[in-house]
Amino acid sequence: MRINPNGLIGGCPALVVRKALRHLRVWDQWGVADLEAVAALAPGTGDALVKALRTEGLIEASARGAWSVTQAGRTFSVASAARPVTRATAEKALAEFLDRVEQVNRDPYFLGKAIRVVLFGSMLKPEVMRLSDVDLAVELVTKEADFDRAREQNYRRAEELAEKGKQFRNVLDWELCWYFETRHFLKGGSRVIAMADYKAEKALVLAVPHRFLIGEPEQIAAPTTTRPAPRQRRPRDCPF
């Protein structure tokens, strides 16, 4: 999916809406104040945007005064605003990405490895010759299986990078240094590659046409329904 970078939704720039939905999609439900915070809106001005998002089918009511992001909203949140590229350019970018995955997985320098890579989006439609991007969902894990050793390795790597001048924005950047370093290398600075976190976006990815390029395929678990217990008939002589 591609969005117009100059477009508006409810008077709000489409790129701001996309960023807001990326934050809100991981919450089961949220309120207008939460939307105002992530979209940098003035307090008390979010109702108009909520109405527009609901009209577009990007959100739905989940409880009184609470909202949740729909499947369409999740799709919008990962849409590209880049200029379309040819299929040949996209295929080249994908091949180069898979080469980087192979390098990451075999090079002991990298503390993380990719155990799943899933292709989804417009590249799976052969009739589409101009593509917005190459949508990939990637699952990264630490190469070290032991949690304490993996954490110690991560801290050492973060300290090494800090000594070289790397700035860490917050504690999360420090704690997940291994993840962001691996992810940054896989991205390779390519504007064609759009990476999603497989574990976070699993429901979205598996709900649309997709193809597992690396790793064991998975399916969305079918919802379980509980059959009501058979109604017991009262004995004829029962007084109640």
Image (cartoon, rainbow, N blue to C red):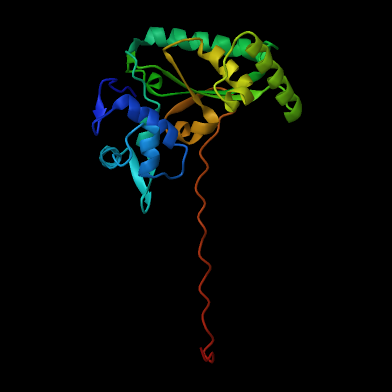
Q: Residue at 26% of width from left, 38% of height from top? A: 52
The residue nearer to you, when weighing 205 against 231, is 205
The residue nearer to you, when weighing 43 against 193, is 43
Indicate whether 201 appears above or below 88: below
Going by the image, does 46 lie left or right of 142? left
**Residue 222 at x, y percent in the picture:** 50, 45
The residue nearer to you, when weighing 156 against 183, is 156
Corner quadrant of residue 24: top left
Q: Residue at 54% of width from left, 90% of height from top? A: 238
Q: Residue at 60% of width from left, 27% of height from top? A: 171
Residue 114 shows in the view: no
Going by the image, does 190 lie left or right of 106? left
Tally of numbered tags: 0
**Residue 85 at x, y percent in the picture:** 35, 10
**Residue 19 at x, y percent in the picture:** 39, 28
The residue nearer to you, when weighing 47 against 201, is 47
**Residue 151 at x, y percent in the picture:** 71, 25
Query: Which quadrant, please, contains the N terminus?
Result: top left
Residue furthest out toward the front = 43
Q: Residue at 36% of width from left, 51% of height from top? A: 65
Indicate whether 56 appears above or below 15: below
Corner quadrant of residue 167: top right
Going by the image, does 54 lie left or right of 123? left
Going by the image, does 122 lie left or right of 114? left
Indicate whether 229 appears above or below 110: below
Residue 128 shows in the view: yes
